[in-house]
Image: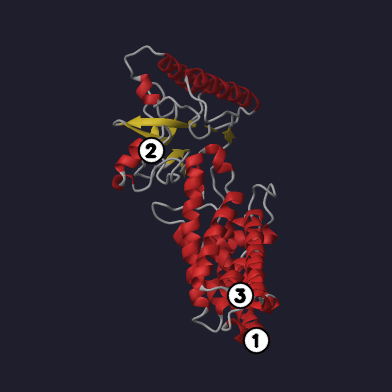
Amino acid sequence: MKREQKNKNSFLINLFLLLTGAFLFASSHPGLFFKNGNSYLAFFSLCPVFLICKKNSTKTSALWGALYGLFSYSLFAFWLFSYEKTAFFAVLFLCALQHALFFAILSSFSRLTSAPFLAMALLWPFFEFCKTSGELGFSYGVIGYSQWTSDFFLKLSAVGGVWASSLFISFTSAFVSSLWDNKFFFFYSDSHLKQTTCCHSYKESFFIAAFAIIFLLFSYPFIRLYEKNLSDTSPCKESLNILLVQNNTDSNKYGIDVYKRDVSTLMDLTKKALLLHPETELVVWPETAVVPPVCENYYSPKNSERKVLIEELLSFIKESNVPFVIGNQHRENGQDFNAALFFSSQNQNVVPPEPLVYAKKHLVPFAETFPFAEYFPSVNKKILSNARYWARGKNDTLFNIKNISFATPICFEDT
């Protein structure tokens, strides 16, 4: 009876840690709970994770890790459901697998070292790097991104990447976890865990604090060097006055009437803005602002509504006498690309359209592309075929105005 009560308490405290961890993770980022995120909560967000992995067996940690992946990303990436339901559930499944594996790894490492929380803190940025890489890479949710409003962490990330910010946050969570460790000790029945002592826990806390301080001391000269390079860099002799135009439309609605309305809205907004800001030197429209492929429809022999729409668009761009970057479903060799098109009257590439094109390279898994489709062709074709799936771009493209070169990462690529 006594053992059953301890097991029940163990389950309840694990559940509490799971829900708390999911809430802290989601709240650290802009989203459901805080419009701009609460960056301070990020420093405690990994405490429940580390405590679960420290206090449970490898198998049990893997189970709680899968549940953590499901709950945390349900709260964090809730917006994906309205954008693409298939992608939402695919991401949850992927995150469940990733976190199950990594929780098991953290739990195993916690038993191989006398400083388990320090080991887990050092491993966390490595996990984030792995989950953002490759065909299934999903960059949303890196804990370092929660510090996007902090000048210090922006500089730290400029020196060591976002992983440096994630490492410092994981140090903080590990330090708090090591101090809190003994508070949850009596809920667990594992005899191995009973060997933990308050003295040992505080000893590890000291080591974690020391590592964090050394990390900051090591980073500080590089941050100062980065600041010096910024101050020593000559100001750019050229500058650009950029006009950003964003319409409010439903990306799930299709058809020529919708496309005509959206382009008309963007042209009207641009006209009004150019009157207010005649100094504008570049106009930027959003991702897939113009859905019908510009080049294909312009050169089409059919006198269709789409062709007329594209002709009106190009005429407007030419008459505006300002370079444009527009999002477009660009079609080339029978493949559709999520692309940015650069038009400039000075380059005489507006009419006929011969724009510089950047095609998106890093596509959103399951929303814009089906990963490893070549290994599952029947699944990709029959079950997961989606009109918004894109071909993957292969080349980087630089645009140039007044000897100022710039690139256009699209949506997911910004992460």
Q: Distance between the residues labelled 1 and 3?
A: 23 Å
Q: Answer yes or no: is residue 159 visible.
A: no
* Residue 367 placement, left or right of 71: left
Figure check: 80 above or below 335: below
- Can you say which quadrant of the picture contains the N terminus? bottom right
Q: Which of marks 2 and 3 is nearer the N terminus?
A: 3
Q: Residue 197 carries which label?
A: 1
Q: Earlier in the sequence, mark 1 or mark 3?
A: 1
In the depicted structure, whether residue 141 falls above or below residue 312: below
Q: How many marks?
A: 3
**Residue at left offset 37%, top offset 47%:** 371
Compute the Cα span from label 2 to label 3. Answer: 49 Å
Q: Mark 2: give few (<14), some (14-19) or many (20+) Cα within 10 Å.
A: few
Residue matched to label 3: 212
Q: Which residue is outermost to the top? A: 303
Asked if one can make out residue 257 in the rendered structure from this viewpoint, the answer is yes
Residue type at mark 3 is Ala
